[in-house]
Image: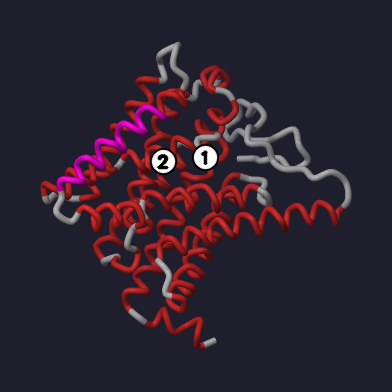
Amino acid sequence: MEALIEPFGVTFVQRALWAGLLVSAICAIAGTWVVLRGMAFLGDAMSHGMLPGVALASLLGQSLFLGAALAAGAMAAGVTALSRSPRLSQDTSIGLLFVGMLSVGVILVSHSASYAVDLTAFLFGDVLGVREQDLLHLGLSLAVALVVAVVGHRSFVALAFDPRKAHTLGLAPRTAHFALLGLVTLAVVASFHVVGTLLVFGLLIAPPAAALLWARRIPAIMLTAALLGGAATFVGLLVSWHWGTAAGATIAAAAVVFFFVSALAAALHARLAGGPRTEPSRYPDSPAPAPTPSLTTTTERPVTS
């Protein structure tokens, strides 16, 4: 028992734990929609597309958070603009901007005297270096994410099924799409300082994907994902303390391990229960034009709003 408690008696580990819990909650809210809508590549590209903004802010001595936000916003706007071309698919647009932004970022970082250190911190984060001010920023980001998720819930549900249906219901699918991109941007920007851009993808995708195997309602998926992300943070910090591994990478690795354990448990449960294995579909059925539409699938385990 002492081995479980000992690391968290240190102040900087306590701050790291709180930061990880806040990041897990933010990523659970945004990541649920990323998984449901199949936006994983976009989330990964946006996390890397922040590099030019972070590098430029570092060279100018400005806020890294602000630089990351501006770069991620530019990335989201660029993807939206290029996707309107009938000759370019969204994946092509994302890939082009992904490579372009990442290249510009590396070029900017290479002009820094501390090139290796700066790039490593950006890619892998520094969860053990979290300050009280960072916790405040994460808390505010979580509050904003909750507001956006609650206000846009009906529109996000309809958008996850069919933008045309959302338009028919008067739910402004284009505005909902922009709001959803903003939510993903917020999650990525708020999390990169804790686990880095290469590893934020783990917390954004793995916990919601694991939760989707068990939960049927969207709020339940988000809550389960937040709990799994928090557990990954605790386990990652514990393993990092005792084994001397990189904290951010260990947290992300724990989140991915939890997903595979969840998938294995779901498969075993389906086999023991008898009958074919069923999973919730990524796309819901059409929500009824009621005040609170539901999100269902044609499988035995529907996903609802």
Position of 150 relative to 231 (above/below): above
Q: Amino acid at mark 2?
A: Val
Q: Are marks 1 and 2 in contact (CB under 8 Å)?
A: yes
> Which numbered marker is on residue 184?
2
> Is residue 44 left or right of 132 when viewed as pictured?
right
Quarter of the figure with residue 82 = top left
Depicted 241 relative to depicted 100: above or below: below
Residue 33: mark: 1
The residues colored magenta run 95-111
Q: Residue at x 38, y 46 (%)?
A: 188
Residue at 81 percent of width and 51 percent of height? 270
Residue 150: % across, % down: 47, 42
> Of 139 and 75, which appears nearest the observer?
75
Tell me: 122 left or right of 180.
left
* Amino acid type, residue under disc 1 in the picture: Trp
Q: Residue at x 43, y 41 (%)?
A: 44
Quarter occupied by residue 185: top left
Crowd rating for badge 2 (residues with CA inside 10 Å; few <14, some 14–19, many 20+): many
